[in-house]
Image: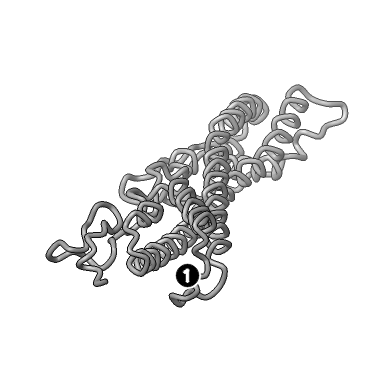
């Protein structure tokens, strides 16, 4: 029986006997992109740079606040400095998660697994069409239709459905007779499982990256409060020392980022005279 005489419906409603009918369905899955990139913005980056400068300033001036007996402001300075020293690694750690590329890697892996499953579904769909011709069984193709969308869970479900149909209809030998090498049922189940795992991995990577971004505002807010505390202590302790106050002004200033590019380098701090 010639396939164009059978009137079989191939894939999503396309008849083989229609003029210009395609040999196989066209199905091109697309990588799902998320519009939110979960990256630190310029304002946040500038605040991190300020904390790094303040940390360096506090290290330089630490000896001025280790007095015996203690002077007013020593305890506040020490506590705020310790807080910044502990805070900076937390913030940079979240930055590393953002920039680590985990979500991008998971997305690429997901696309690869999706493509492999789609190609296998096409192979099974095509072979099932040949088996239906041999058996003069047009209804067989209702068990082996390609999915209409590119949803990963739908693709995985269709892979399992194809495997179930081959088992229920005892078609494994017919697939082998038509040149399929390997265990078609197991291959379908394995590819479907790989797609599900890739979907889970991508979701986990996105959640991790989004969590890092969500944690930054509170960390930066804590840093601003510590800098505000230090600002009062520094100005009180060094009110008669313009050199140190100048260095502090540079260290504690949040540099604005021009709209056309990256933030310019901060001007060098004037040398602080010994205390």
Q: In the picture, residue 241 is in which quadrant?
A: top right
Task: Identify which residue is drawn at 81% across, 34% down.
Answer: 66
Where is residue 44? Give x, y as percent. Answer: 49, 39
Q: What colour-coding does the image apply? A: one colour
Dot 1 alpha-carbon crowd within 10 angstroms: few under 14, some 14 to 19, many 20 or more: some
Please state which of residues 259 and 178 is positioned toward the viewer in this rendering: 178
Q: Quadrant of the C terminus?
A: top right
Please state which of residues 88 and 170 is positioned toward the viewer in this rendering: 170
Asked if one can make out residue 101 in the rendered structure from this viewpoint, the answer is no
Where is residue 115? Give x, y as percent. Answer: 43, 62
Please state which of residues 191 and 135 is positioned toward the viewer in this rendering: 135
Q: Which residue is mark 1?
A: 174
Q: Quadrant of the N terminus?
A: bottom left
Q: Tell me: residue 264, above or below residue 131.
A: above
Q: Tell me: residue 84, above or below residue 233.
A: below
For the residue labelled by badge 1, is the local secondary structure a helix, a strand or a loop?
Answer: helix
Q: In the picture, residue 225 is in which quadrant?
A: top right
């Amino acid at each position: 029986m010639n396939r164009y005489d059978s009137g079989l419906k191939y894939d999503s409603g396309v008849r083989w006997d229609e003029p210009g009918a395609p040999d196989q369905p066209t199905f091109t899955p697309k990588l799902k992109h998320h519009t939110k990139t979960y990256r630190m913005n310029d304002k946040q980056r500038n605040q991190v740079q300020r904390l790094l400068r303040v940390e360096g300033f506090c290290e330089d001036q630490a000896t001025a606040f280790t007095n015996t007996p203690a002077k007013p402001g020593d305890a506040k300075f020490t506590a705020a400095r310790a807080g910044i020293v502990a805070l900076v690694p937390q913030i940079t750690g979240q930055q590393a998660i953002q920039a680590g590329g985990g979500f991008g890697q998971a997305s690429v892996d997901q696309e690869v697994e999706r493509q492999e499953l789609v190609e296998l579904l096409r192979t099974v769909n095509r072979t099932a069409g040949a088996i239906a011709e041999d058996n003069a069984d047009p209804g067989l193709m209702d068990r082996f239709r390609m999915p209409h969308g590119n949803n990963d869970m739908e693709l995985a479900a269709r892979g399992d459905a194809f495997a179930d149909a081959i088992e229920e209809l005892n078609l494994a030998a017919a697939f082998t007779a038509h040149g399929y090498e390997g265990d078609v049922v197991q291959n379908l189940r394995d590819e479907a499982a790989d797609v599900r795992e890739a979907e889970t991995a991508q979701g986990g990577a996105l959640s991790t990256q989004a969590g890092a971004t969500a944690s930054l505002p509170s960390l930066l807010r804590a840093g601003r409060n510590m800098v505000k505390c230090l600002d009062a202590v520094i100005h009180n302790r060094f009110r008669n020392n313009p050199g140190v106050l100048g260095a502090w002004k540079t260290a504690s200033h949040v540099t604005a980022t021009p709209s056309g590019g990256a933030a310019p380098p901060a001007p060098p701090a004037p040398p602080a005279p010994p205390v």
